[in-house]
Image (cartoon, rainbow, N blue to C red):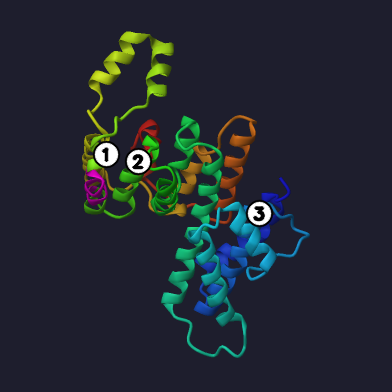
Amino acid sequence: MKFRNEAYTDLVNDVVFDAFYAERTNRGKIASIRQYAEIVVRKILDIPENDVVTLGNKAIVKQLELVSNNSQLLMSSIEKIRLIGNKCTHTQEIGEITDDDVRDCINCLFNIYASIFVIYFQKNKFGSKNEVMSAFSILPPIIRYLTLNELYKEYPDNLSIIDKLSLVLLKAFDKDQAIQWVEDRKEKLSNTLPYTEEAIDEIKQKYGPEVAQQTIKNAPSNMYISCLDRINDVDEIIQRNGLLYSNFEQAKELYLKKGILTGSSREISYFNSIMEFVYLGRKKENNPKLEEINSYFILK
């Protein structure tokens, strides 16, 4: 990889601090977010530190379109940060920079974060590695939602995407939105089995045909029922214990303890690199809930 996280550690620490933690004007916050967005673009395109990158560069835009299959989530977000950022850097722009402008830029930045993971899972099937799924679950719910929502558009039959998306709607928003998402797809999900033939074959090979048969027997009859059951079960836990984490700061301690995967394959190495990058510069917030819940459950 040409882009090195370690080369940008100091700069990312500075711009993340200025954008999210420092007492600054809205104009200053957005200027830092725009600068940070350029670093994220470098990460996506694997551009080393010696090469020049600007958000409006036509060659950069074309490369982003190519690597993302012209993702509108990514391209529109970069363009919006560029335009709002221009208002904060050009002296002829003398109008007020509002809190809404800052929120828009942060939302666009989250879209760009999600796009990094979308691109990763376009190359590495979502759900194919349990350890990757566990680490992915440590991301804030909104980042997971944005990622899974985009992946679902492209892979609507992937059972892992369906399952995780229905649950993250509950965590990022509320139970009503999660239930509504499932109900809107009732017909399709009712005709979808909650397991694949490949998964059953794998169980047969590992544990024998009797265990595989029992797995089928005990499973919900279809994905519609499976999603509703899972949403209700997880909602009960959230109602009882609260949401485990909602942002990078609350999740960072768990990421440092459980989110760095072992292994040297290209797939694992790049996933680790992405996770390290999105957590760079984020402060670690004390989160007592991490001590109250069994780590195995956390990562399910």
Which mark's residue is nearer the viewer, 1 or 3? 1
Identify the secondary structure beneath mark 2. helix
Instruction: Give whichever of 203, 63 is nearer the camera.
Output: 63
Determine the CA span between mark 3 and mark 2: 29 Å
Q: Residues within 10 Å of mark 1 (few under 14, many from 20)?
A: many
Give the residue number, with chain letter if any, for mark 1: 189
N-term-proximal mark, 1 vs 2: 2
Task: Judge left or right: residue 167 versus residue 135.
Answer: left
Image point (67%, 63%), residue name: 60
Per the image, the residue denoted by label 2 is: 162
Q: Residue 45, labelled with which disc? A: 3
Q: Is residue 25 visible?
A: no
What kind of element bears circle 1?
helix
Q: How many marks?
A: 3
The three-letter code of the residue at mark 3 reads Leu
Q: Main secondary structure of the magenta part?
A: helix
Whether label 1 touches label 3, CB < 8 Å: no
